[in-house]
Image (tube, rainbow, N blue to C red):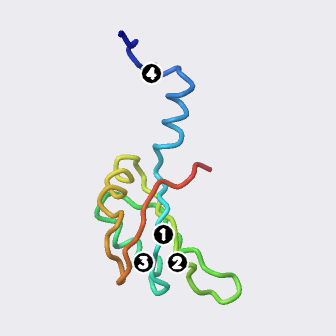
Amino acid sequence: MHFPSCRLSFASPLYRWLMYCHSSTKLFVGGLSYDTNEPVLKDAFDKYGEVIQVNVVCDHVSGKSKGYGFVRYAEEMAASKALKEMDGQLLDGRNIRVQYSHKE
């Protein structure tokens, strides 16, 4: 039995969709301690590249952290390295989850 070679061309819709969904400079960080603030989050992710934006999402009424946030890098390679290195790591006593954020 012969199976045809499966190659993706740069013009292929599947290739463009994969690149759209899986390459980004913005990371979602979940499982944060409610005590983790933006400077702490930035310090934890700064070693992988230039962090250009950090946001810890807070409740509008109480002002307390909701336990997740976002980190944006200047370059995709830095975001990729941070995702690989930080996913599952301990930060402020909690194991965090890191994944690419949905594209805006």
Q: Are marks 3 and 1 in contact (CB under 8 Å)?
A: no
Which image quarter: residue 7?
A: top left
Disc 1 marks a residue whose amino acid type is Gly
**Residue 28: x percent and y percent?**
49, 62
Give the number of callouts: 4
Q: Secondary structure at mark 4?
A: loop
State the separation of the CA atoms marked 4 and 3: 41 Å
Q: CA distance from mark 3 to mark 1?
A: 16 Å
Secondary structure beneath label 1: strand
Amino acid type of disc 3? Pro
Given this view, does label 3 or label 1 mark the residue nearer the observer? 1
Q: Secondary structure at mark 3?
A: helix
Q: Are marks 2 and 3 in contact (CB under 8 Å)?
A: no
- Residue for badge 2: 67
Q: Which residue is mark 1?
A: 30
- Where does label 4 land, which residue? 8
Q: Do the numbered discs 2 and 1 sit on residues whose CB atoms are within 8 Å?
A: yes
Q: Earlier in the sequence, mark 3 or mark 1?
A: 1
Picture coordinates of residue 100, whole percent (x, y) = 47, 53
Secondary structure beneath label 2: strand
Q: Is residue 60 left or right of residue 85?
A: right
Identify the residue at image location x=34%, y=67%. 88
